[in-house]
Image (cartoon, rainbow, N blue to C red):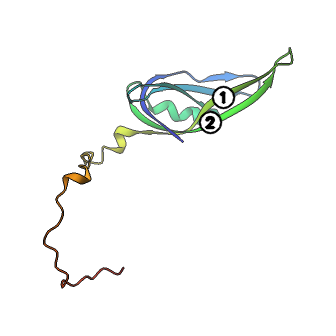
């Protein structure tokens, strides 16, 4: 799965516990009719992937949805979801190959049907 949008915030790397678990959060704002602010966490060695990104960049993040179950001291079962990133791409760099983005394709009904067809013409298509 992927999340695409503009970087709103990049947090500092946090370290937890004696085992050195690391986590870093990024918030991406989607660009759609109702923009969403999606928080994605990168963990362990993936936290370093965010070093080359800054607020305002357009990015595409490859994600995994994670869920876990936890039973609190009162015996109640709780469920938690998280969005974990494992790859991030700068969309501006992807479009910087010298070419401009392609214009949108016009609707099919805006094309005129062909009128110069001749059934005697040779058809060299293999199917």
Q: Could you tell me residue 107's position as x and y percent? A: 25, 49
Residue in the foreground of this view, choosing between 75 and 55: 75
Residue denoted by label 2: 65
Callout 2: few (<14), some (14-19), or many (20+) C-alpha neighbours within 10 Å? few
**Residue at point 45%, 33% (across, down):** 52
Q: Could you tell me residue 80's position as x and y percent? A: 69, 26
CA separation, marks 1 and 2?
Answer: 7 Å
Residue denoted by label 1: 81
**Residue at point 70%, 22% (across, down):** 16
The quarter of the picture where residue 89 lies is top left
Q: Residue furthest left?
A: 116
Q: Could you tell me residue 34's position as x and y percent? A: 41, 25
Quadrant holding the C terminus: bottom left
Q: Secondary structure at mark 1?
A: strand
Q: Secondary structure at mark 2?
A: strand
- Vertical placement of residue 110 versus 24, above or below: below
Q: Is residue 127 left or right of residue 81?
A: left
Residue in the foreground of this view, choosing between 72 and 40: 72
Quadrant holding the N terminus: top right
Q: Is residue 61 left or right of residue 65?
A: left
**Residue at point 14%, 69% (across, down):** 115
């Amino acid at each position: 799965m992927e999340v695409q949008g503009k970087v709103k915030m990049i947090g500092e790397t946090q370290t937890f516990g004696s085992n050195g678990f690391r986590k870093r959060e990024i918030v991406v704002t989607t660009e759609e009719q109702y923009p969403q602010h999606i928080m994605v966490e990168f963990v362990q060695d993936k936290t370093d992937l965010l070093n080359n990104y800054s607020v305002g960049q357009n990015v595409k993040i490859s994600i995994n949805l994670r869920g876990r179950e936890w039973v609190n001291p009162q015996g109640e079962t709780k469920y938690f979801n998280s969005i974990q990133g494992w790859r991030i791409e700068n969309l501006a760099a992807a479009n910087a190959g010298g070419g401009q983005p392609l214009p949108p394709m016009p609707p099919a009904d805006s094309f005129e049907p062909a009128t110069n067809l001749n059934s005697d013409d040779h058809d060299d298509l293999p199917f």
